Amino acid sequence: MHAEGEDWGQLRGNGIKRLNGVPVLNADGTYAMETNKYFGSVLPDFMGGWFNEFRFKDFTLTAALDFQKGGKYFSLSDFWGSFSGLYAKTAVLNDRSIPVRDPLIDGGGVNVEGVDGDGKAVKTYVEAQTYWHQFRTNSNIADMSIFDASYVKLREVSLGYNLPVRKWKTKLFTQAHVSLVARNVWLIYADEKGFDPSELSGRFGENGQMPGVRSFGLNLKLGF
């Protein structure tokens, strides 16, 4: 579905109902739902890269940086990880410094603030399992798993050296360059550190992203 006047590539789904920007809560402290909520466009505002090369005598240092500004994505990994209680955020301390997984009678539970249907302020505590399960059982509320796809990443770094071939007096080759290369070096910035927006499997529903792998290698270039 696309709405006239809004950005192309719209990300829509069931979300938290809000009144003047404040979440509306049901009687049990869970969030009221709003259907067909607009979360933003999956397309970035802009993206680009930067390549630097520094030379000193026979040494060469290169670095490649890429970046993206804007765009949204829905993470199914975060959605199901939160629902199943596998993520660290489902086992933190609440505002009373008590584990949220402890029973409400012992001071546990997730602190939830919002308003009721009449706009009256509400502050309450919800059992951790009830809180995190609501996003699946309450018609798949997606808000908590929508992230900004902006990122800055140091993609590659290479340090090379021109070997002194002429001093070797060999006729096999005329030049040789050896370099150490590191790829996927550093995700400098991302809205959600658990995911790499530059490696998304899908923006409308990121699903099972593998952990980023940093690699190191040795390159040898010969000239004849």
Image: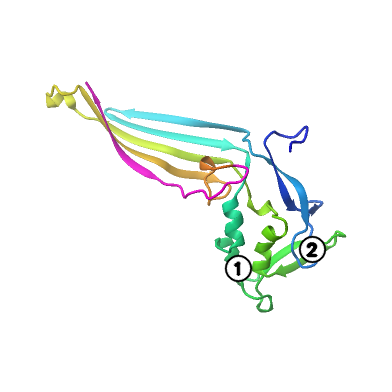
Q: Pick whichever, 84 or 46, lies toward us.
A: 84
Q: Residue 134, percent across and down?
A: 69, 61
Residue highlighted by disc 1: 93
Residue highlighted by disc 2: 26
State which quadrant residue 104 falls in: bottom right
**Disc 1 versus disc 2: nearer the observer:** 2
Q: Pick whichever, 213 or 151, lies toward us.
A: 213
Image side of residue 214 versus residue 109, left or right: left
Crowding at dot 1, Cα within 10 Å, few <14 / some 14-19 / many 20+, comes out as: some
For this orientation, the residue located farthest to the left is 169
Image side of residue 61 versus residue 141, left or right: left
Q: Residue 123, percent across and down?
A: 76, 66
Image side of residue 117 versus residue 158, left or right: right
Q: Residue 171, percent across and down?
A: 13, 21
Residue at the image position 51 percent from the left and 48 percent from the top = 209
Q: Residue 128, percent across and down?
A: 65, 68
How far is disc 1 from disc 2 in space, using C-alphas? Answer: 23 Å
Image side of residue 222 versus residue 48, left or right: left
How many numbered discs sit on the rendered protein?
2
Q: Quadrant of the C terminus?
A: top left
Q: Which residues are magenta?
A: 203-224
Q: Quadrant of the N terminus?
A: top right
